[in-house]
Image (cartoon, rainbow, N blue to C red):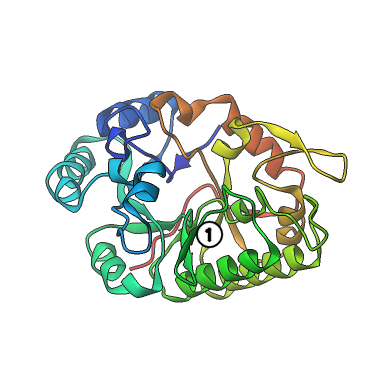
Amino acid sequence: MLKANYHTHTYLCGHATGDVDDYVNEAVRLGFKELGMSDHAHTPEYFMSADEYRHNFLEEIMTDDEFDNNYVPKVLEAKKRSDIKIYLGLETEYFPEFKDYFVKLRKKVDYLILGEHFFNYKGSNYSPYDPFTPRLAEVYTDIVIEAMESGLYTIFAHPDLFLMNYNGENGHRVFDKTAEICSKRIIDAAIKNDVYLEINANGIAKGARRTDSGKNQYLYPREEFWNLVSGTKAKVVIGADAHKPEALGYFAVEKAIEFAKQFDLNLCDFVEFKK
């Protein structure tokens, strides 16, 4: 069982259920010592069409006004009266063009989680949820490394998400040399910039599928990535990525703990937050 979770969403993200108090009550029931609320921050609509923005459900994510006048007050109130430590956080994309926006957000919260679901490349929108070429993997890697080097982020959620639909040089769903190089660069940047890498239980909840190597694997976390983390100084944390209160103690969390035991990881029960 987890002692803490820092990847937690509420109904304000548009694709989750439960309010702050619901998650706090469940965390207390489960015996947690700490809980970090980390709902999705508003995603600037600058490189997507209106249809793409709607298709990706980004218009459902809380607005800056909802963040200031709904989300923040609820988390701060929970901080005051909870028997466990509560932290105010956000999960954000990283767009280099909007770095000032993320700097402003970081000043308002205890921590930011990097969750790179979308990025701009040559004026078009790309996502790891869609088929991913080696070149897109390289672009993704460049962007998330820049994000980690910004000093804004404490945790990198599902850092291996880019492997979810990755097709290598030969067009097959395999972990090839480019995937290995990108993975190593991400791991090295996390170590250098003191960013926690997250084993994401929500990926486990989505189930496994057969890769072209003939092996059944989770969509994420991917064994090949975490084999490269194994034996390094990278700090690792398990994240429930909870989208409903009961997910804090869901079977996928226990599966994530089992998954982590396969490797020699610097697994942390708690996160030390940057000032």
The local crowd at label 1, few if under 14, some if 14 to 19, many if 20 or more residues have their Cα within 10 Å, is many
Image position of 115 (left or right of 108): right
Q: Residue at x 36, y 47 (%)?
A: 51
Q: Indicate whether 272 appears above or below 9.
A: below
Q: Between residues 45 and 196, which one lies in front from this camera angle?
A: 45
Can you name the residue that lies furthest to the right here?
A: 214
Task: Please provide percent x and percent y for residue 60.
Answer: 29, 40
Quadrant assignment for the C terminus: bottom left
Locate the N terminus by quadrant. top right
Q: Which residue is under mark 1? A: 196
Pick the front one: 151 or 236:
151
Left or right side of 74 for 85 = right
Residue 247 image position (x, y, % from top left): 47, 28
The residue under the point 77% across, 44% down is 262
Whether residue 35 is visible, yes or no, is no
Amino acid at dot 1? Tyr
Q: Is residue 19 above or below residue 67?
A: above
Is residue 138 shown left or right of residue 68?
right
**Residue 110 in view (yes/no):** yes
Q: Position of residue 53 (x, y in %)?
A: 35, 49
- Nearest the viewer among 237 and 47 is 47
Q: Pick the residue in front: 16 or 241.
A: 16
Q: Residue at x 68, y 61 (%)?
A: 133
> How many numbered circles are shown?
1
- Which secondary structure, mark 1? strand
Q: Position of residue 86 (x, y in %)?
A: 30, 44
Work out which residue is located at the far left of the displayed protein and give it.
69
